[in-house]
Amino acid sequence: MSERNHGDLLYQLLPTVFRARDNSERGPDGRVVKQGDLQKYLAACGELLDLFHATLEQKLADNFPLGEKVGVNRPPQNWILPYFAELLDVQLLAPDAAGRREEVANAVAWRQRKGTPPVVEQIAEAVGQLDVEVQEGWKRVAVTPRIGDPLVSSRYFGLRWELHPDYHPDGDHGLAEDPGTHPSDMARHPGFPAVTPDFRRPPGNVRNTHVSPETPHPPTDPWKPVPPHPTPDCRGTHLDITRRTPDMRDPTWQYGHYTPYTVLVYYRIPEGFFPEDCNSQDVGGPPDEFTVDWGDLEDTPGFEYDFDEATGKGWAKYTPEVPNTVLRVSGEPKLSPGVYTFENIRFISLNLLKAGTYDLGGLVVETSCTLAQVGVHHIQNLVLGGDLAAATSSAAGRIQLDLECCALSSVSATFEPAEDETSSSDFINIIAKSCLFGSLATLDATLQLEYCTVLGNTTAGHLDASDCIFQGLLFNQAGVEDFEPDGAEPDFLPEGCLRYCRVTEVVLEAMKSSDTTQAEWLNRDSPPASLPHSESVFFVASEFGEPGCAVLHPSSSNRVCFGAEDGGELGAFHDSYHCLRREAIAEKLNEFLPVSVQAVLIPDRTLWIRSAEPTTDDS
């Protein structure tokens, strides 16, 4: 999006003599620290011109659904898209605006090539905003070889030579004295309808440099699996292209794939807060790392840092000499409130200078962080491998901690009362939205959660939660490690209220059997759908710090995947629409597939990592 400041532009267009006579004040570096009267007047005029310019730019952008992708400076407004869709007879199914723009922009192109595999892949990637690989089910069904049917050229499958009885890679091809290709190699031909895997060779990828001339639209993915009948260790992924006997069960993510009436859509599993290169128990990052003290960063080659106090924007970038290297910063980095962008940088520890708004741009901090400054701390996009502690006393004042889109290993709150006071939860207030927690120990705080996932136990004096997933137990007292669920009384629950939440069976039974004030947990004045439940929930990964941690697996119950108040999924990734994207892809593809052909969405972990170099069939 372009940003014009017409006030400065008008001021720079003035003759130098008028700018020299203006009563502005400049610092030692020559920058203006205080605007003069003339510059202030032109700045006021420029604000109106900025509005006119932005309105004209937006009017232009509203004519292009893809906006910035076609050279326009800004995307169209979201309320415009339904009018485009009605004009082109498009049913908008994508849960987010980016997918809807793709649906509108590609409506005509998709209809022109309706039912073809390239269009199926384009629709799935556009609507779901996911990386997918598509296979046709009829190609995965084992059939009987027929005499006389020619095999497809091996070169089209990425192999380096022809697999033919009269072909030898080192001879004068086609001559009678050439021994030709060995029968054992002929059995590996991609076009041969074999079912038995070839255990002699591991699976891998090769670059598909040969494309059939008859293909009007070459595949966008240059990688092809080889050998064509790999070992079963890649079963259930897009690398597996072995043929199998038909499976006539109703298709799900797990079975019913191998029939002529299915299209297999292997999609990349969302990684959540922890990308593949952050795979470590302590969120320490990849093995190639370079540690530098905070005070020595200015002398570090490849490090750049800047913070503008006027706009509150800061950025730090590390350009490593060796690829795949992350800079680890030791010491006590001190950040002022603002919006930050970090690239290839992690902090061992972190110190926030004062209360304010911190958008840390997905910064990874390995150890703990303590907040003792009185005020409101609004923290966004922070990945913390240690404990985020809020500590205050009645003499110091009140602390409010607002968390949004954060992944925290643990959160604790400590209140130190005066001699004549008792512990109180009125001085620490923790509000979290779309966050992932390993555990919560907030007995001295009021806890309010919305769209959050807690992997461990939660200890709180007062807990209000909506659309959350609690994998552990809920307590109103310390010492949870000595808790025995079978012999506990139902009064171990904290005060508060839960709605549209998933809890464990132990907690749910305690809520139902409670005849004290904890009966408010059931929220009996609301519809039955809003009551807490203990439906099955399965994550891609359950360990904090692993890729896919707390991301809902498709085997989870529908009441978890679509049980939020607005029909979305419960937990930390409600606003990411992971479950709704899968449903939108399947429903959209039904419009573009032949009659009786059904799309099956299959999660595929192998799409997390793409090989940088091809793996040949000789490796």
Image (cartoon, rainbow, N blue to C red):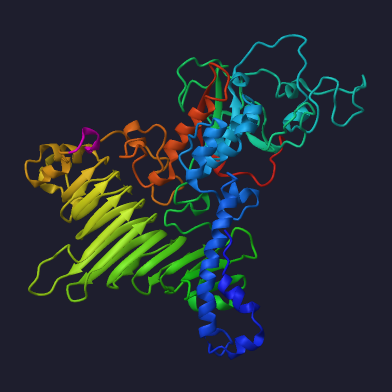
Residue shown at the point (58%, 66%) measured from the top left: 4
Residue shown at the point (59%, 49%) measured from the top left: 67
Magenta run includes residue 528: yes
Residue span colored magenta: 526-533
Q: Quadrant of residue 589?
A: top right
Count of numbered badges drawn on the protein:
0
Q: Main secondary structure of the magenta part?
A: loop
Q: Quadrant of the C terminus?
A: top right
Residue shown at the point (51%, 41%) measured from the top left: 81
Residue 607 in picture, x, y percent from top left: 56, 40
Residue 548 in picture, x, y percent from top left: 45, 45
Q: Can you say whether 591 is above or below 429 in the image?
A: above
Apparent side of residue 593 relative to residue 379 in the rendered image (left or right) = right
Residue 133 in picture, x, y percent from top left: 59, 34
Mark yes or no: residue 295 visible: yes
Magenta run includes residue 155: no
Q: Quadrant of the N terminus?
A: bottom right
Mark yes or no: residue 34 visible: no
Front one among 465 and 192: 465
Front one among 579 and 82: 82
Q: Can you say whether 573 is above or below 157 in the image?
A: below
Apparent side of residue 58 relative to residue 321 in the rendered image (left or right) = left
Q: Quadrant of residue 364?
A: bottom left
Q: Can you say whether 54 is above or below 164 in the image?
A: below
